[in-house]
Image (cartoon, rainbow, N blue to C red):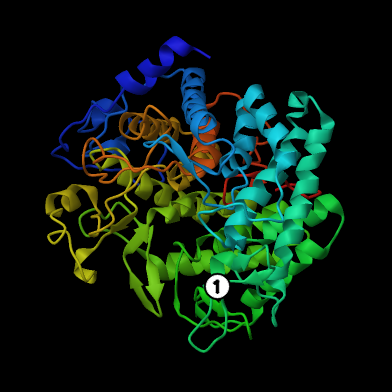
Amino acid sequence: MHHLNIFYLLGAFAYAAEAPAANNTTSPVHQNTAIDHAAHACPNRSYDRQCGRDWDYTSYPTNQQDRADAVVEMFRHAWDGYRQFAYPHDDLLPRSNSYSDSRNGWGLTMINSLDTAIIMGQQDIVDIILHFIPTVDFTKNNSPDSADTSLFETTIRYLGGLLSSYDLLKGPFAHMVTDEKKVDVLLSQAVRLADTLKFAFSTTTGLPVNGLYIDMQTSTFDSLLENGDSASGLAELGTLVLEWQHLSDLTGDPLYGDLAQKAEAYWFKNVTEIFPGLTGSKFSVENGSTIDDAGGWTSGSDSAYEYLIKMYVYDPERYGNYSEQWRKAADSTIEHLLSSPSSRPDLVMAGRYRGKIVRPETDYLACFIGGNFLLGSTALNEPKYREYGLKFSEFCANGYRHTSSGIGPSRSSWNNTELDSDPSLADQTEHYKHAGFFIPTGHLDGGQTPEAVESWYYAYQTTRDQYWRDVAWAYAIAQNKTERLPVGFGSLQNVLAEDGGGTDDFMPSFMLAETLKYQFLIQSPKEGVWNVQQGENKTNFFVYNTEAHPFRVAAKHPV
């Protein structure tokens, strides 16, 4: 690692902030050709897509190994803070130099970030975590901060982290193994965890309840409806199948996959669609029926749609029906959910819906949609999904570029004529004119989220356009400028303030598990089978779960 260059790379190349150019000339989002600067009105920009926008990429270093090393330094800074002040608890509180146990007290940050340390080649960190994992008792909740357990969160973070690390250490990173028994424990602990959680599926329909008291093997009252029935969220029932099926494939025990597949079947067959392939987001555990009409590619529904195409990538022979369901949802999204800001018709994004009414707003968790469409485009060999995947990725790149902090907000809205609120109420009229979005009151926060850089990673893998690496690099610089604390990182209070408006006192495990993993993957000049969309045919030998944990695909002929 080039230690002397890292702070120079991440600090000195902070934003060259400029006023918007007078001529807001933009080319189509999906155009990826290099520009002739002399032919455009913004010769001081690296890319024509930046015309009229705030941040200049021309000064960025071109050595990709230096960039990758700088991302590793960020990871180690986050890890060192956790190791010093939070080990072996779940989360680092970076301002108070303390810890919390938000997810059962099982060492969430360690298990969630193990595969990141593996991919980055951080042997010392890998050894520490592998030594810790056998000590975890997954049958008991050790958290004084939370008495209940989320089936969804525990699956994507803990189960996903164990399985992906097992795949990597049994495969392309076997050279990092110093004790095979500790690798085998990853799978046995995954089985123990799934056995602890599987009672969640013991309902009339087989739809799982999400809130669990694992010590007593009972569900919480969080999901109860007014009539006494329990509800299962779409993201909860639809985001288990990849992890639980992969566990079955690794162990040879079909039980785990069967439980998740039965729940998924209700979504495919027994629900009322708002648009073809798009449904409500809550389901009755008693009879499997839909009990609301709200949804979209936003929180509460997002990862269920994400997993449709990922299950197909995991094994096309077994899960061809998943690709058809995804195609329906993607086509309906294009036909019914898209709109452009009145001030920026070059941008386009999917809104959220309630019934047939589509609202032009999104949360930045939905920024993963670009990468998901790009994965679908290569897996299904369908160019139109590529076009829209790049457009969605650009919408989120624009969202980061047009805040003073360089960090995207937690929620954004556009097309003020269709909203209950508008830019003037948020004192963002001028911002809306050139940025194409405004931030609703109460949503100025932002920070460590991975979804945008996830899509930029897929965009780079799809196009090999350096632009996406530079967009991601701008985010890394912004994080170091505004979020970095002496110990770890904190999220921002106000992304429209140049300094971020201060940080909170929490470093989520996904900062290490997802955000910095995708940053490393997009910047690193070294690639391997763990990267998505490999080679001329854009083949996937691994598929990433919603928490950025890569699983080796089961496909005989990977797509």
Residue that extends furthest to the top in the rendered view of this protein: 4
> Can residue 12 be seen in this snapshot?
yes
On screen, residue 104 above or below 322: above
- In the rendering, at what x and y percent does residue 149 appear? 59, 60
Q: Amino acid at mark 1?
A: Gly
Residue at image point 44% right, 32% down: 469
Is 15 placed left or right of 559 in the picture?
A: left
* Residue placed furthest toward the front: 144
User: Where is residue 306 drawn, in percent x and y?
Assistant: 56, 58
Q: Is residue 452 above or below residue 224?
A: above
The image quadrant that residue 500 belongs to is top left
Residue furthest right in the image? 252
Q: Which residue is mark 1?
A: 277
Residue 246 appears in view: no
Q: Residue at x 80, y 56 (%)?
A: 248
Asked whether, in this view, residue 502 is left or right of residue 244, the answer is left
- How many residues crowd mark 1 within 10 Å: few (<14), some (14–19), many (20+)? many
Mark 1: secondary structure: loop
| Residue toward you, 123 or 211 | 211
Q: Please name whichever residue, 38 or 308, is drawn nearer the observer in this view of the structure.
A: 308
